[in-house]
Image (cartoon, rainbow, N blue to C red):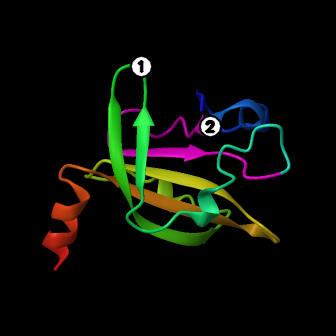
Amino acid sequence: APIKNGTSLKILKEAIGHFSETPFFSGNICLAAHNRGNKQNYFENLKDIELNAEVSYITKYSEQKYYVSEIKEIEETDLSVLNSTENNQLTMITCVANKREKRLCVVATEMNNSLEEINQEEL
């Protein structure tokens, strides 16, 4: 899916929006997209994602792999999820059906090891 800088309604109608106050390649990369009711609903399946699912972030410069490490509902006004982090992660935000003031927030952590190694380290 195309990614454009900014999260205005105009941008979200045609692309995944990148929160311009967050980095584009490392750190906490924050993205937003519609999941229903629009011509482009790039995050329509985000509600079905599971922990440890693999996510790819592909730019013209590189491809980075992530695994889903956190899934949570946040208030629409909670901008703390945009804060800088020491680790590389993707933070993906979309609406929650029938909960106007809530947002689904999915955090995916960059894979430095294979998922199997990560799971073994957690044991």
Q: Which amino acid is tagged 2?
A: Gly
- Quick one: SS at disc 2? strand
Instruction: Please tell me which residue is depicted at 21% across the width and 54% down the height of the picture.
Output: 114
Name the spot of residue 103 as percent of width and height, x first. 66, 64
Q: Is residue 51 magenta?
A: no
Which residues fall within the magenta stretch?
17-36
Residue 16 in view: yes
Tell me if residue 32 is in the magenta stretch.
Answer: yes
Q: Name the residue located 46 percent from the left edge and 40 percent from the top edge.
A: 22
Q: Are marks 1 and 2 in contact (CB under 8 Å)?
A: no
Looking at the rendered structure, which numbered label has been put on residue 17? 2
- Which residue, as the protein is rendered here, is positioned at the far front? 116
The quadrant of the image that shows the N terminus is top right
Q: Is residue 54 above or below residue 98?
A: above
Q: Residue at x 60, y 57 (%)?
A: 46
Where on the picture, by quarter, is residue 51?
bottom left
Q: How many marks?
A: 2
